[in-house]
Image: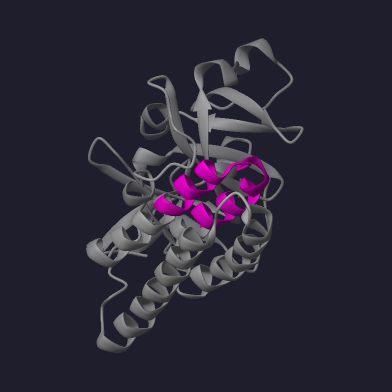
Amino acid sequence: MSDFFGDDFTWELKKYFLEATSKEVESFMDLIDPSTFAKVTAEISEASSSWVVDAKSNEFSFLEIWLTDFLEKMESLDSVEQMHKALELLHKYLTGLLSEKKDSAELAAHFPLVAQSSREALFLHCKTGAQQFVLPIGNVIEISGVLPVFQLPDARPGLAGLIPFRGEAIPVIDLNSYGFQSVESDRYYYVICEHEGMRFSLRVTETDELISLKDQDMQNLSDHPTMLSVPFIKQFFVKDQHSVMVLDMEKLVA
């Protein structure tokens, strides 16, 4: 979360986690070579599982997503060079968190595990119940946990209410108004977004990995009339046999 170094005690806890993880990453980088690759990779995988848990407990939302993605891609890192590059990226990311003192989408986007071509873009994968969608990572400011939602004096179509964020009242887009399934959950997350100076939030049940997508990965919704028709969704892609919608931020705030 942003401003997570707000007091001395919190600073020490989070700083300790970042520094300790950085040292572990450095030690793995020193150990790994062709003769020890298989053994060290297994150890890195085990350590990464712990890092994911620790990142979540320390409220590093985007680092947690990055590490989860790293853990899932572990099998594809099948050479010493690839593993070194991934560990080096992680080390730079951790160093960046210590320097910037801010866990943000912008910082995470500087360390993509998969190199992007000029026609690729990074997206944040979100879920609301069984339905899935992605948001351009460049529009995401922060992922917040439980927040109070204040109802508007006059009900407005498409808005679920307002949430407090850095001294502002941020509108919450009501996805149910656009045909998304109604979801009952004990815990929601709020993805705070900004587009052309306008801030708003989306209430989700889960935030997942960062996904790199190319133009050819996308399919047009107009070619599949049986799918959900939403004004701010024109494209989707298929991941693990599930359709994932791509939100058009410009249409969303129109």
Q: Nearer the viewer, residue 218 or 101?
A: 101
Q: Residue furthest top?
A: 223
Quadrant assignment for the N terminus: bottom left
Q: Nearer the viewer, residue 107 or 30?
A: 30
Q: What residue span does the magenta drawing correspond to?
A: 65-88
- The residue sitting at 37% across, 77% down in the picture is 14
Viewer can see residue 135? yes
Rendered view: 176 above or below 205: above
Rendered view: 116 above or below 52: above
Picture colour scheme? one colour
72 in magenta: yes
Question: In terms of secondary structure, what is the magenta stretch mainly?
Answer: helix
Rendered view: 198 above or below 60: above
Measured as percent of width and height from the top left, residue 240 is found at 74, 36
- The residue sitting at 44% across, 25% down in the picture is 120
Q: Nearer the viewer, residue 176 or 45?
A: 45
Q: Is residue 97 left or right of residue 186?
A: left
Q: Residue furthest right?
A: 241
Rendered view: 207 above or below 59: above
Q: Is residue 175 left or right of residue 72?
A: left
Q: Quadrant of residue 121?
A: top left
- The residue sitting at 37% across, 74% down in the picture is 19
Measured as percent of width and height from the top left, residue 234 is found at 53, 20
Measured as percent of width and height from the top left, residue 149 is found at 45, 64
73 in magenta: yes
Q: Is residue 102 left or right of residue 209?
A: left
Quadrant assignment for the C terminus: top left
Q: Residue furthest front?
A: 35
**Number of marks in the rendered image:** 0
- The residue sitting at 57% across, 35% down in the picture is 178
Viewer can see residue 210? no
Measured as percent of width and height from the top left, residue 177 is found at 56, 40
